[in-house]
Image: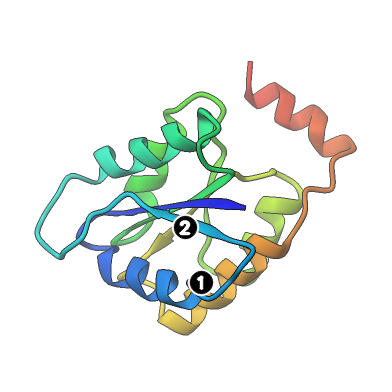
Amino acid sequence: MKLALAADHGGFELKERIKAHLSGREDLEIQDLGTHSEESVDYPQYGKACAELVAAGGADRGIVFCGTGIGISIAANKVKGIRCALATNVFMAEMSRKHNNANVLALGGRVLSTEEAIAIVDVWLSTEFEGGRHQRRIDLLDC
């Protein structure tokens, strides 16, 4: 799976920790779209860059990070075909995949511990979309 990561300064540290956690996985090809420091940047640029890459097929899924995950999820969801879900716990991550077929995950670097974020990411990456009645609802989102 090709996985894109992007963060603003508020999510930079958590992005780096998640990237380190995932780096040993042979089933993942990780592309880091930045930012590459804690210097202040504008989250919409990073959310959009990740979402556009996923929407264009350059990555299968993406994970975006900012201070709360809220702003960058809004930015990502502006891109047609993106279903970015903000998750603050494992259940939300699981349901975002099972029922919403989320192709981008948003996490908050200032609201989650590294351990919480790792658990969320691991569940999100391993959970499959259930399809069925949920596909009809997904189709309504893409109108």
1 or 2: tag closer to the N-terminus: 1
Q: Between residues 43 and 19, which one lies in front from this camera angle?
A: 19
Q: Residue furthest right?
A: 132
| Residue under the point 51% across and 66% down | 88
Task: Characterize the local packing of mark 2: few (<14), some (14-19) or many (20 or more) Cα atoms within 10 angstroms.
Answer: some
Q: CA distance from mark 1 to mark 2?
A: 8 Å
Q: Which residue is mark 1?
A: 22
Q: Residue furthest front?
A: 26
Q: Quadrant of residue 121?
A: bottom right
Q: Amino acid at mark 1?
A: Leu
Tell me whether the residue at label 1 lies in contact with that at label 2, contact meaning CB atoms closer than 8 angstroms: yes
Q: Which residue is mark 2?
A: 30
Q: Quadrant of residue 100?
A: top right
| Residue under the point 42% across and 38% down | 76
Question: x%, y% of residue 99?
Answer: 75, 47
Can you say whether 109 is above or below 4 in the image?
A: below
Question: x%, y% of residue 20?
Answer: 41, 76
Can you say whether 82 is above or below 111 in the image?
A: above
Q: Amino acid at mark 2?
A: Ile
